[in-house]
Image (spheres, rainbow, N blue to C red):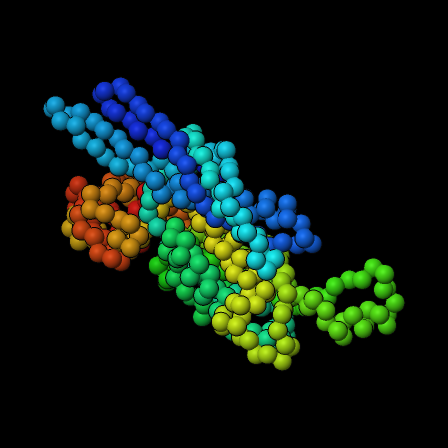
Amino acid sequence: MRSLQKTVVTFAIIITTCMLTAANVFATTIQARGDAIIYDNDITDARYRATEQAIKQATLQASSRLSVTESLTNGQISSKLRLQAAGKTQNTRILSESVDDNLLSLLVEVDITPESMCDNGASNLYKKSVAITSFELQVPQQARLGALYNISRELPKSLVQEINHQGYLKALSATNISVYPDLINAPTSTNYDGSLTNITRLGEDLGVQYVISGVIRDIGETYPKHPNQKTPINNLLSWAKKEDQQRKMVLDLYVYDGFSGALIFEHHYDESGEWDTDEADKVRFGSGKFWSLNYGKVVAQVLRDSSLDTSDQLRCQPFVANIFRTEGNLIHLSAGSLAGIKKGDQFRVYRRYEIYNQLQNTQTQLNNANINVTITQVQPNFAIGELSVDAKILNVQQQDVVIAW
């Protein structure tokens, strides 16, 4: 499969007028919110990180804007909407700022100047589907504090909600599935058949373009250090008092291409927050009490960061959907109006081939068939497209795919 390129934080709106040889290109201004945790009372550092997040949010918002192409045909002007999701940000202005429980929030205004499209030419508005598996806890004993035994399934469920709330991807919950038999070596754990992961099978079974998995590395407690109290007895007393009891949230996030199984993005999150409740409280992950804690707010921030990072990394990737049925010159696609597909949209058909690597494990390869398909009917979860001739003549089969750049 062709290599998936890393995205850049860019955006453009372009208006072209065909045959009239006139073109207008303009910048746009976006307002977006950013949040960051304050450590060691360092407001400047938190403001920098919150601004970075807000700029990323603004870029994603800008990527949903449309451009207009106007053409003159037989004396009549017709307009066509299309996306040019690229450009660069500049002139960032902080409009408001607030601090609540060691969390800095700000609202920024960003000017986004037209430049070029995504590096790989992707310029579509379709929502790419992602399935999110369970996030296993590397040290299960750490869940005892607060009775967070449900964290492996509830944390990724919360990530599903956050991604869908952002609105740039279509996330599905598959938290009953555990990807890694060996958490310590994840994501390079080896399965029984010698393969590194079973992502390709998961992507096919779940009918999604991407699979997101992760490992919760650490949710253990930490305690404040006292430089002037270095004796063993004072360290022990400090631990016993549990002053300003802190708890870690260390998370590794992995994003895979569901067709090839390739790992295309990974990120390490390492935050901590105050566990400001009694040690005996059975809070449980995701409860109202959990989200009210300072630690819960820190976890919510990690989830928001990871949802924005994932959306930002996938926004410039091509949209891919399976062909699950052929009938005459009609083909059925495994994506519909919920993914943003509309009647009249056009896609390019790619043939799927199975090849074998040196370990005789199957790999998926997609080759451009140079065949166009036009959408004629759209349902929420599938769409029907029309080919120029019968699918059998063109050798278009089930499990081939369509791609939009």
Q: Is residue 181 left or right of residue 42?
A: left
Residue furthest toward the left? Answer: 74
Does residue 143 lie above or below 172 as drawn?
A: below
Residue furthest toward the top? Answer: 21
Q: Say which quarter of the image contains residue 189.
A: bottom right
Quadrant into which the C terminus falls: top left
Q: Say which quarter of the image contains residue 87.
A: top left
Between 102 and 178, the residue placed more toward the observer is: 102
Does residue 173 lie above or below 78 as drawn?
A: below
Residue under the point 15% across and 50% down: 328
Total marks in image: 0
Query: Residue 204: x percent and y percent?
Result: 37, 59
Residue under the point 26% across and 37% down: 81
Quadrant into which the N terminus falls: top left
Query: Residue 72: x percent and y percent?
Result: 18, 25
Query: Residue 334: x percent and y percent?
Result: 28, 55
Q: In this rendering, does residue 209 appear at all? A: no
Residue under the point 35% across and 46% down: 319
Q: In this rendering, does residue 385 appear at all? A: yes
Query: Residue 343: x percent and y percent?
Result: 20, 46
Does residue 82 lie above or below 146 as drawn?
A: above
Residue under the point 26% across and 49% down: 341
